[in-house]
Image (cartoon, rainbow, N blue to C red):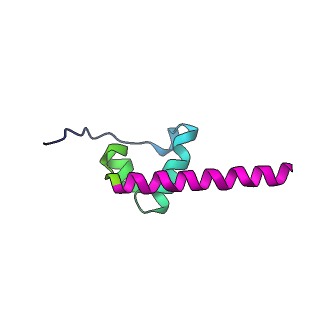
Amino acid sequence: MAQNKKQETIDPAHLKPEDKLKFEIAEELGLGDKVINGGWKSLTSKESGRIGGLITKRRREMKKQVLKENG
């Protein structure tokens, strides 16, 4: 079963706010160039899962920080 993945390029300067965190984490993992050149679809499921897990962790930490500051 061949998958037909279209190559799309990502412009980091014009990302939606929710995609900025995702791209930032992808860069930290060394996947920034792969995402820029091939789009999010170019990532493997393992790479995508790693990014998703770190997004969840980072959001939890940010929420704790906000609650700590307000509270």
Q: Residue at x 54, y 51 (%)?
A: 55
Residue 8 at x, y percent in the picture? 32, 39
Q: Residue at x 49, y 62 (%)?
A: 28
Residue 40 at x, y percent in the picture? 37, 45
Relative to the observer, which residue lies in front, 10 or 18?
Answer: 18
Query: Along the horizontal axis of the image, is 14 left or right of 68?
Result: left
Question: Majority secondary structure of the magenta segment?
Answer: helix
State the extent of the magenta-drawn residues as a range: 46-71
Q: Residue at x 33, y 51 (%)?
A: 43
Q: Residue at x 55, y 48 (%)?
A: 21
Relative to the observer, which residue lies in front, 13 or 6?
Answer: 6
Q: Is residue 21 magenta?
A: no
Query: Along the horizontal axis of the image, is 59 left or right of 11?
Result: right
Query: Along the horizontal axis of the image, is 61 left or right of 52?
Result: right
Residue 68 at x, y percent in the picture? 81, 54
Q: Name the image quarter holding the N terminus.
A: top left
Residue 46 at x, y percent in the picture? 35, 56
Residue positioned most to the left:
1
Q: Is residue 67 magenta?
A: yes
Q: How many marks?
A: 0
